[in-house]
Amino acid sequence: MRRSDKEITDFGEKLSIFGQCEILRLGMSDEGFPYIVPVNFGLEEDDGQIILYFHSATEGRKTDILKKAPHVCFETDCGFELKKADTACKWSAKYKSVIGTGNVEQITAAEEKIRAFEVIMKKYDFPGKPEFDSSALERTNIYRLSVEEFSVKQSI
């Protein structure tokens, strides 16, 4: 990271910032061309390993790419606020951002899909325990993104 003065290194603080972010931008490689798509996501941490969950339709470009190329990158950010100044070169912004890489695998077992959905719904403050329609679960792909590495940056 070029600006190490903005890097967050404390793991707990990194997780806190990650949890504040609402949308994950998933970067994939489609036969040599980049393809980025925003997704809702849930986050889980177990003994230092971060797992992200997201869902999609059972067909489409994202699904096709992930079958061929499951190694991805991702970005999410929050807290953006423009900092205006008298001259253009002094304008800046406040923000918190997370950038990382990982591998994606599709979850197929119904119980695992429900648990992953619960993690996603918890992130967005769904009240209580969500109920799931089995036919809707069958029409939905759920993915697990095992994070290999990530960095967090904050500008205040």
Image (cartoon, grey):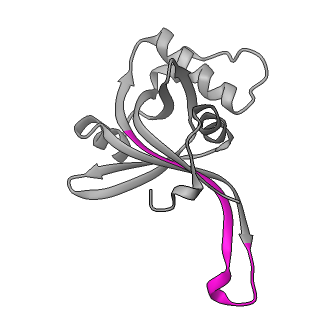
Q: Is residue 121 visible?
A: yes
Q: Is 43 placed above or below 133 here?
A: below
Q: Looking at the image, which residue sits at the far bottom?
A: 87
| The one of 137 and 10 positioned closer to us in this rendering | 10
Quick check: 92 above or below 48? Answer: below
**Quadrant location of the N terminus in the rendered image:** bottom left
Residue at (50, 33) in percent of width and height: 54
Give 10 or 151, whichever is nearer the viewer. 10
Res. 72 image quadrant: top left
The residue at 64%/44% (across/down) is 21
Percent from the top left, x then y, of residue 86? 75, 89
Q: Residue at x 67, y 30 (%)?
A: 123
Q: Quadrant of the C terminus?
A: bottom right
79 relative position to 119: left or right: right
Magenta stretch in the rendered image: 83-101
Using the rendered view, name the quadrant where residue 10 is placed.
top right
Q: Position of residue 13 (x, y in %)?
A: 65, 37
Horizontal and vertical percent position of residue 124: 70, 33
Q: Is residue 104 part of the magenta span, yes or no?
A: no
